[in-house]
Image (cartoon, rainbow, N blue to C red):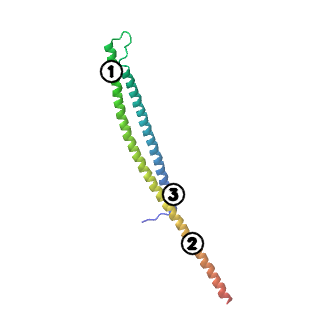
Amino acid sequence: MKRYPLQTLLQLRAHRTEAARLAVLERQRGVQQCRAKCTRIDGEISTLDDDRRAQRARLLEPPPSGVPWPAALAQREAHVDLLGERIVAARARLETAHDALRQAEAALRDARDAFFKAKGREDALEKRREVWRGEQRGLQARQEEAATEDLLQARHVARH
């Protein structure tokens, strides 16, 4: 198995972590768009429902002059039915939007998991690098101590 230099691995991990972070941001924007769409459709349903209630309240109002009662009543009932159909269609769109929102939230969870996994790997490599540096410093200090000890012993032997 080929071993890569630690710095190269750190750069690769940093790149992957950044790519995962950007994926999380992209998924967050997708979730926000889905939520906005659900909110917009919900507002549309509320507006249509209010309009339908208002039209039902106006069913028994006297028709404008020159329009017979049966024609005015039929027209108003048809309008109430049309509003009801639009509400049903909007509710179907809302259900579809909720499904899309659930999918977007699942994708966001997956992206977050991938980010934290990549970040954990990068942090583990950073820790490994710090441990290696500590070992190198310790080794260098021991070598310097050994060299100093050798010099002291050589000086001591030269005096005697």
Instruction: Please tell me which residue is depicted at 60% across the width and 79% down the height of the picture.
Output: 146
Q: Observer-nearest residue: 88 or 133?
A: 88
User: The disc labelled 2 sits on which kind of residue?
Assistant: Gly
Residue 134 placement, left or right of 59: right
Element class at badge 1? helix
Instruction: Please tell me which residue is depicted at 48% across the width and 56% down the height of the picture.
Output: 119
> Few, some or many C-alpha atoms within 10 Å of disc 1 (few <14, some 14-19, many ≥20)?
some
- Which disc number belongs to residue 7? none
Residue 153 placement, left or right of 107: right
Dots 2 and 1: beta carbons under 8 Å? no
Q: Which residue is mark 1?
A: 77
Q: Which residue is mark 3?
A: 11
Q: What distance separates the C-alpha of mark 3 from that of mark 2? A: 26 Å
Residue 82 placement, left or right of 159: left
Task: Indicate the position of residue 147 as horizontal and vertical percent values.
Answer: 61, 78
Dots 3 and 2: beta carbons under 8 Å? no
User: The disc labelled 3 sits on which kind of residue?
Assistant: Gln
Task: Indicate the position of residue 65 as horizontal and vertical percent values.
Answer: 38, 10
